[in-house]
Image (cartoon, rainbow, N blue to C red):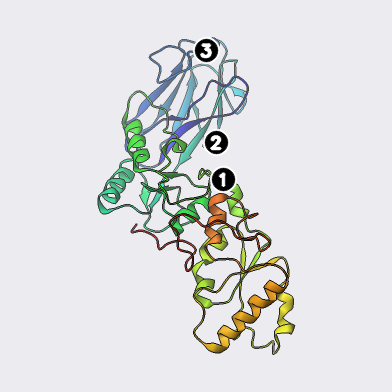
Amino acid sequence: AMWFLQSISGPANIFDKAWLLLAPGSTARQVTINRTGDADIPLSQDSSISRSHAVIHIAAAEGRPQLKIEDLGSKFGTFVNGERLAANTPRILQEKDELKFGGNHACARLCFQKHVVCASGLDAAQKQTAEALVQAIGGTWSPDWTAECTHLIMQQILVTEKLILALCAARPVVSVQWLADVAAALAAAPTKPRPDPAAYMPDRGEAIGIASTLLPNTARATLFVGRTFIFLTKTQFARVAKILDAAGGQRVLYTRRALAQAPHVEQAAHHLNPAVLVIKAEPLPSDEAELAWVRTVELLVAERGQRTIIESEISRAVLAADANQFCNQNYHAPLPLQNEPQSGAPVPAPAPA
């Protein structure tokens, strides 16, 4: 967990970095902000910043330390949420407070982040290193991906369920080196810029044949909103539940037994409308009656001039942040991912966490 100052976009904003303020368990400290070279946060490019401008007082605490800001009698002032501070009068800060220094838009927002870190595809040594670094930055290690996770650690991009869920949640995917650099920055004095997760993307290797950025993209969380996926086998129906839920899709189990109340295929066929995607059954059911049912449904789809969807397209659509090619029953012959099985699970089995 850490406090940091995040730059606020705006005209001539010279807060071009996010600045870390405190390491977990640190002793009380002060963070100076002025335009001299020895400031903890130097704003030397702005002539409206005084040589002795402001200081942030940080109390010692294991969890969430209290922060106060004090203007040191600067000429052009220090502001909290638009209100100019009286000189030499500390004010308690709250998360999301907006700070402005001087008269030329040196603006930042105060942020507090708890790190809940999950990993995918790490070997035993890498995992041990990552766990130690998470502890060093005051974070929490999660063996499974949950809604509380803030980062996914990978050394090489592998198409795993954890990766797809992290992308749907718009969480950064970073290498172990990011943890190491955050730990080093937190321990440093003076205050250091917060390492940008975007600069620590794991090696893509040859696992992904999709030319798409894997940086956080909130559009992935609604990628399948308004789409219904029909599954012809129970195994597939359960296997992709987390991913479809994370991307906003709906799923329906459409086996012969599940629709026993519809005695004729024609009576059930109204469910197979153009807004519904039918997932190709893989592997095919061994029961002859169920297999005949699958073939009948596939024929209904084909008669509409559409195609069944390969299950792995669900993960491909998330990777590409695009459902116009993948998971589109009117788009024929999408390119497969390199090194990805052509049938079975939507992603290879997750590597050891």
Q: Which residue is mark 3?
A: 74
Looking at the image, which residue is at 49% across and 50% down? 209
Going by the numbered disc 2, the residue's amino acid type is Lys
Q: Which residue is mark 2?
A: 96
Looking at the image, which residue is at 71% across and 65% down? 275
283 sits left or right of 228 in the view: left
Going by the numbered disc 1, the residue's amino acid type is Asn
Look at the numbered disc 1 and give the secondary structure of its residue: loop
User: How crowded is the residue under tag 2: few (<14 C-alpha within 10 Å), some, or many (20+)?
Assistant: some
Task: Tell me where residue 187 appears, x and y as whole percent.
Answer: 31, 31
Above or below, 184 against 162 in this view is above
Task: Tell me where residue 196 appears, x and y as whole percent.
Answer: 45, 34
Distance from label 3 to label 2 (Cα)? 23 Å
Q: Earlier in the sequence, mark 1 or mark 3?
A: 3
Distance from label 1 to label 3 (Cα)? 40 Å
Position of the N terminus by quadrant: top left
